[in-house]
Amino acid sequence: MELKKGKKFYGSVTVSERGQIAIPAEARKDFAIKTGDKLLVLGDLERGIALAKSNFVLKMLESTLEAMRKFETVIKSDDEPVEKKSIPRRRPRR
């Protein structure tokens, strides 16, 4: 069932006695989940559980780390302290 653009409802699943669930076929197809793929189970106590392919999370972490390294280079290359600028105060309204 299509909700908003890019959002879908894939149905419901039942937890087995062993705590297992089956991911609906359409969801597996849409997210290219294949037998043997590693998924991370993420949780938010207020919002619920989410599954993410581990290679997707790894790519996100790698790009974040790359950005942080660039920030570090910029910060360390600036030898002079940042000048504190005063901000003019506004006159109180009457």
Image: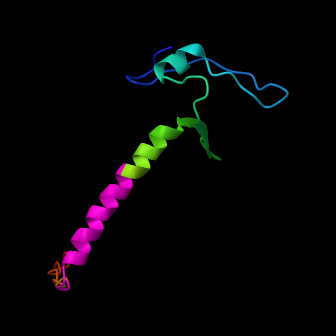
Q: Main secondary structure of the magenta part?
A: helix
Question: Residue 43's x, y, as percent?
Answer: 62, 44
- Residue 26 in the image: state x and y as whole percent: 53, 14
Relative placement, left or right, of 45 versus 80 is: right
Question: Any magenta on residue 72?
Answer: yes
Residue 36 in the magenta stretch? The answer is: no
Residue in the picture at 37% in, 57% down: 65
Q: Nearer the viewer, residue 64 or 3?
A: 64
In the picture, measured across the screen, residue 63 lies left or right of residue 53, that is: left
Query: Residue placed farthest to the front in the image?
Result: 36
- x 48%, y 24%: residue: 31
Q: Is residue 70 left or right of residue 38?
A: left
Residue 39 appears at what percent x and percent y? Answer: 59, 36
Locate residue 47: give its quadrant: top right
Q: Which residues are magenta?
A: 63-81
Image quarter (top left, top right, bottom left or bottom right) of the C terminus: bottom left
Q: Is residue 84 above or below residue 58?
A: below
87 or 48: which is nearer to us?
Answer: 48
